[in-house]
Image: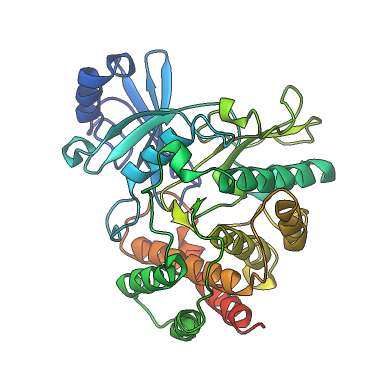
């Protein structure tokens, strides 16, 4: 999903470097702070898949690391926060939650034009397309979904204060602020009529639940293709107790053909929207991906969730929640409001990406269809928020 013309580059901003990086400035910055990562020639490749923050693989001498930076242009306030991503993966490193090892954070926008951070690269795959998930056996797809939910339960079990994240968010009033925040983001991304979206916003705002589970670490965009996993011979079975030993970065596409062997989640990625709040928000958004984008006739072969959900042979959303509930002390309760919030949030994100695409501020392919996902998400969100 990345245009080869912008995907790979050598040293220097004008020598074929991917858009969004100035390799000369980056090499000078690293030379002063992490010289082992600045050996010439410094090369970079834009990693496919992300629709928001940009992720690059950097090669320097014998080292390979991953760089994350915000998208190009139209960056919404409070979104794409590199400092928060760097802080939370640093804090979670010693826990049962597998995260990439944080290597360096740079707040200086003069280096590449935006704040960025570096993290360790570890082998694994991001499963995001049918070409990757179809070769998996039924058992492997079930194991991958199970590991996804076990990892989420492990995240929600982490005590924020125990890892230095007591001030990472404001749990009180979290759900109401979520509605207001995404309503504000929507207003900054409006470029066309969006039938029903204001009705969904108002329905959510008028029925905010109390949020009895507030105070947990919330990922904010938890889904299958924000996990780095291994499937096949030579991997180890999922073990949340040991998962903190496995750090990761974005991986390559899966090879064609069946691959016998167990499943392991190696890292949870893309922490830009993490905070302290109600863990049901993670479950609601996951179901929006899984049962709306992953199992709806309205969004077949969509560029966001083509390889996940029941349509791709994975367990149902109900089975996912049952697995989570069996391994968590979180009261899952009625999730309809949280699914509606997930649909609203995802619709706003897709509309923001669509808007950036119309401005020519996206890199790679697939962005021309993102705008098509907004209407079915709004429709499903309206149905969900009306449930009792």
Q: Position of residue 317 (x, y in %)?
A: 72, 61
Position of 13 with respect to 189 (left or right) is: left
What colour scheme governs how the chains and residues are painted in the rendered image of this protein? rainbow
Q: Quadrant of the C terminus?
A: bottom right
Above or below: residue 344 compared with residue 53: below
Q: Quadrant of residue 189?
A: bottom left
Q: Position of residue 234 (x, y in %)?
A: 73, 22
The answer to whether any part of residue 46 appears in the image is no
Q: Residue at x 30, y 51 (%)?
A: 72
Residue furthest to the left: 110
Q: Residue at x 62, y 31 (%)?
A: 243
Give the camera-side residue of 91 and 1. Answer: 91
The answer to whether any part of residue 162 appears in the image is yes
Q: Residue at x 40, y 83 (%)?
A: 193
Position of 45 with respect to 157 (left or right) is: left
Q: Quadrant of residue 354?
A: bottom left
Count of marks, rendered view = 0
Position of 89 with respect to 187 (left or right) is: right
Give the camera-side residue of 160 and 45. Answer: 160
Q: Position of residue 96 (x, y in %)?
A: 59, 34
Give the camera-side residue of 358 and 270. Answer: 270
Q: Residue at x 35, y 51 (%)?
A: 80
Q: Position of residue 344 (x, y in %)?
A: 50, 72
Above or below: residue 279 compared with residue 337: above
Above or below: residue 77 compared with residue 45: below
């Amino acid at each position: 999903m990345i245009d080869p013309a912008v995907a790979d580059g050598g040293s220097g901003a004008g020598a074929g470097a991917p858009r969004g990086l100035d390799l000369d400035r980056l090499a000078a910055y690293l030379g002063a702070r992490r010289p082992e990562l600045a050996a010439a020639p410094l090369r970079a490749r834009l990693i496919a898949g992300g629709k928001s923050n940009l992720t690059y693989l950097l090669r320097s001498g014998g080292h390979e690391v991953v760089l994350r930076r915000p998208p190009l242009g139209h960056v919404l306030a409070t979104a794409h926060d590199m400092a928060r991503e760097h802080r939370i993966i640093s804090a979670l490193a010693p826990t049962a939650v597998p995260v990439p090892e944080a290597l360096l954070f740079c707040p200086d926008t003069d280096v590449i034009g935006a704040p960025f951070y570096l993290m360790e690269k570890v082998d694994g795959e991001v499963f995001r397309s049918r070409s990757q998930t179809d070769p998996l056996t039924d058992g492997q797809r079930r194991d991958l979904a199970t590991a996804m939910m076990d990892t989420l339960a492990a995240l929600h079990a982490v005590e924020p204060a125990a890892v230095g994240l007591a001030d990472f968010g404001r749990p009180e009033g979290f759900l109401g602020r979520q509605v207001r925040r995404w309503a504000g983001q929507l207003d900054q991304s409006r470029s066309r009529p969006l039938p029903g979206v204001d009705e969904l916003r108002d329905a959510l705002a008028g029925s905010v639940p109390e949020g009895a589970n507030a105070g947990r670490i919330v990922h904010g965009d938890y889904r299958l293709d924000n996990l780095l996993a291994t499937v096949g011979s030579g991997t180890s079975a999922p073990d949340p107790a040991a998962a903190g030993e496995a750090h990761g970065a974005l991986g390559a596409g899966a090879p064609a053909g069946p691959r016998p062997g167990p499943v392991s989640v190696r890292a949870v990625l893309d922490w830009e929207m993490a905070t302290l709040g109600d863990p049901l928000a993670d479950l609601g958004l996951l179901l929006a991906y899984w049962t709306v984008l992953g199992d709806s006739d309205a969004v077949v072969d969509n560029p966001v969730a083509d390889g996940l959900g029941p349509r791709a042979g994975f367990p149902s959303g109900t089975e996912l929640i049952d697995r989570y509930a069996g391994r968590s002390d979180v009261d899952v309760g009625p999730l309809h409001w949280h699914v509606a919030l997930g649909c609203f949030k995802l619709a706003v994100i897709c509309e923001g990406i669509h808007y950036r695409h119309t401005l020519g501020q996206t890199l790679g392919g697939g962005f021309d269809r993102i705008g098509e996902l907004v209407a079915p998400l709004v429709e499903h969100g309206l149905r969900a928020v009306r449930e009792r």
